[in-house]
Image (spheres, rainbow, N blue to C red):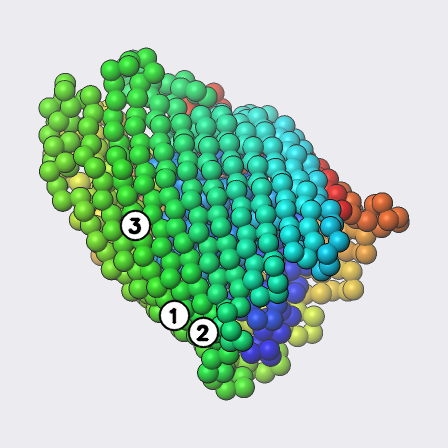
Amino acid sequence: MKQIINKQWISFLGLSLSLHVSAESILMPTITIEGQGARPDQIAVTPESGGGALDSAVLLKRVPGGNVNSNGPLTNIPQYRGLFGNRLGVQLNGISVQEVGPNAMDTRTSTVPKSLVRSIKVHRGIAPVSAGMETIGGAIEINSRRSEFSNNSTPKISGFANSGFSSVDTGRYFGGLMSLSNDTHRFHVGGNTEKGNDYRFKDNQKVRPSEYKRDVISVGYGLRPNEKHEISLDYDYKDTGNTGTPSLPMDIGYVRTHLGSFGYQGTLTNNLDVKFNGFFNRGDHLMSNNLLRPAPRPGGGNQRFRDATTTLESGGYNLHFIIPEFQNGHLLVGFDGDLAVNNSVISDPTNGNFFLNNFVNSTKERYSSFAEWNGEITKDLMLEVGFRYTYIHMNTDRVSTSMANVMMPVHNLQNRFNNSDRSKNDHLFDASAVLRYAASNNLNLEIGVARKTRAPSFQERFLWIPLESTGGLADGRVYVGDTSLRPEKSYQVELGANLYGGGAYFTPRAFYRYVNDFIQGLPTNDALTNMVAGGIQPGGPGPLQFSNIDAHLWGVDFETGYTITDYLRVDGILSFVRGKRTNGNDNLYRIAPVNGRLSLTYERSDWLASLTYVGAMKQDKVAAFNGEQETSGYSILNVYTQYRPSFSKKTEGLTIAAGVNNIIDTKYVDHLNGINRASNINLAMGQRIPNPGRNVFVTLRYDW
């Protein structure tokens, strides 16, 4: 085990250094493989400071195969190897988090601002079953900054403060954390405030609305009465104010969430450890199509004013038992569960009689258990194998709308849904096995296979009237759900290698995934749905209904680098994924084209500088059913420098960073950006949202 993990560390060391200096408007994340005892291929993106005001999810672009679907400055949906949204498991400090809004405006990775993030961990390739429930597309673990116990009884004050400014949106942020701790108690209070205006692209044009505002408060306490037991209590409050989402039909008026958690970890016997997390999450959300943009005029008629108020109530637990020494390895047995209840009401601020109950107590309950073993088969051969069973129950209450009183098709659609069987049960079985072989001192080989599953989301099952409440698909289409949807079942194989020597490293991965019952929007022949959709979206392309199809995805990604001298190195990553239907001649929606980045870095003891190339090829393999647009390739250059003065004790904790993204102010469009849905003098309706233009930024951080 030690031999393989040490090789993993060395093979990723060059990448760790490269990404330490190739930031784009952040103060240098690093990527490392966790040390001895951690799982190989778990990549940790660790922001040393939350530079700029960008969303934490943007860090995923520094992971091979990672990307984001951008619907707004704080609405970046994680994507990994072509799968996104709730196909990826996301945990915050060990607990599952959910979005409040049905269009994922408050993405799960936006729960904590980047300045308060300690690390974002991504399981490269096949995620172990212990990573969580419904990890069909992978797993992401976000760890926030918290206080830590000291090594003696003397109280110690520590913390950090940071701030930053970005020119492209006149964005600024201020954040920090103060902690008081000794070897028995720890306490912290932290926070962050960030605000920015509409961002600019080439020739000083603006994307409207793309302003943002977010405030966060974090409080926590820990008790360690002895070396065998530890208890933690944490509370996080997030208040997102007026924030644009130009790729969606509405913008954020507010998102207010309360997240509380209780944790315990301890040693029960010499060979049995236990870890428990319990949590609750309460969220309130207002969306509006007239707050930051003019209300639309469907079909060129009168303006249609709409607000939507949504709530989330959720809670859950994780109970895991660890046997550190079991059959030449360690055994992990766990029990996970959670419950989420969503409500959504659409109203008209100019007409108090209008209402549409979009989701009424839409409930998803999950109860799961798993077992996972990781250990040695022979001296140079390691095996990780796991099995998970998950039971899911979903239900929703009867719906209603004022439109049913005046529109017979809506009345019939409402009654049909209310009279349908809305109580659904799913049984999910997951299994994974990864074999790692140390072929030589310079080469590790890996092969993995997995079966992963996912139940439909509440939007995919219970969206009863044609609307755009789709979890952030942002294709401009209206959708309806299907209560009879079947769970997705993915079958995956992965091949990989870690090769290093002579100052170079190369870590390629190749994968193939077949997904049975993949959930995708398809045109519907239902006359009632089409008739109602024609009134909601006059002249539109017609509604899509969430349906089961078969699909497959395949691709390669790698990271590589070379140390030229003691101070100069080059590092890069490249990602390719392809997704298609197997029972129809169409591509999957929102698949990233071939993309990558290459950094040249010069580093001395106190300072460093880097020049980074970021590029993507054109994407012409688009989804016809979604009316997806092709995009051209692009190339941009970024420059970054960082200084950590060490000439006196007072400056040892100071880090100053500055840089320029998109140096030559190129106008370019990332294929994963959504299309414009707002009236904008610089962008036509339906045009893909361009990326920011030249951005000069500076960040400061001080640790004590």
Give the mark nearest the N terminus, 2 or 1.
Answer: 2
* SS under mark 2: strand
Against 324, residue 141 (above or below) is: above
Q: Does the image show residue 126?
A: no
Real-space Cα distance between discs 2 and 1?
7 Å
Q: Position of residue 103 (x, y in %)?
A: 37, 37
Q: Residue at x 15, y 23 (%)?
A: 404
Q: Residue at x 62, y 74 (%)?
A: 6
**Which of the pair 53/602 is nearer the observer?**
53
Real-space Cα distance between discs 1 and 3?
21 Å
**Image quadrant where residue 600 sits:** bottom right
Q: Of all residues shown, which one is farthest toward the right?
A: 647
Q: Position of residue 294 (x, y in %)?
A: 41, 18
Residue bearing mark 3: 365
**Would you call the spot at circle 1 few (<14 residues within 10 Å), some (14-19), or many (20 or more)?**
many
Q: Quadrant of the N terminus?
A: bottom right
- Which of the numbered marks, if any, corresponds to residue 503? none
Q: Position of residue 522 (x, y in %)?
A: 23, 44
* SS under mark 1: strand
Q: Position of residue 460 (x, y in %)?
A: 26, 44
**Would you call the spot at circle 2 few (<14 residues within 10 Å), some (14-19), or many (20 or more)?**
many
Residue bearing mark 2: 331
Against 308, residue 6 (above or below) is: below
* SS under mark 3: strand
Under mark 2, the amino acid is: Leu
Q: Residue at x 50, y 69 (%)?
A: 268
Under mark 1, the amino acid is: Ala
- Which of the numbered marks, if any, corresponds to residue 371? 1
Real-space Cα distance between discs 3 and 2?
27 Å
Under mark 3, the amino acid is: Glu
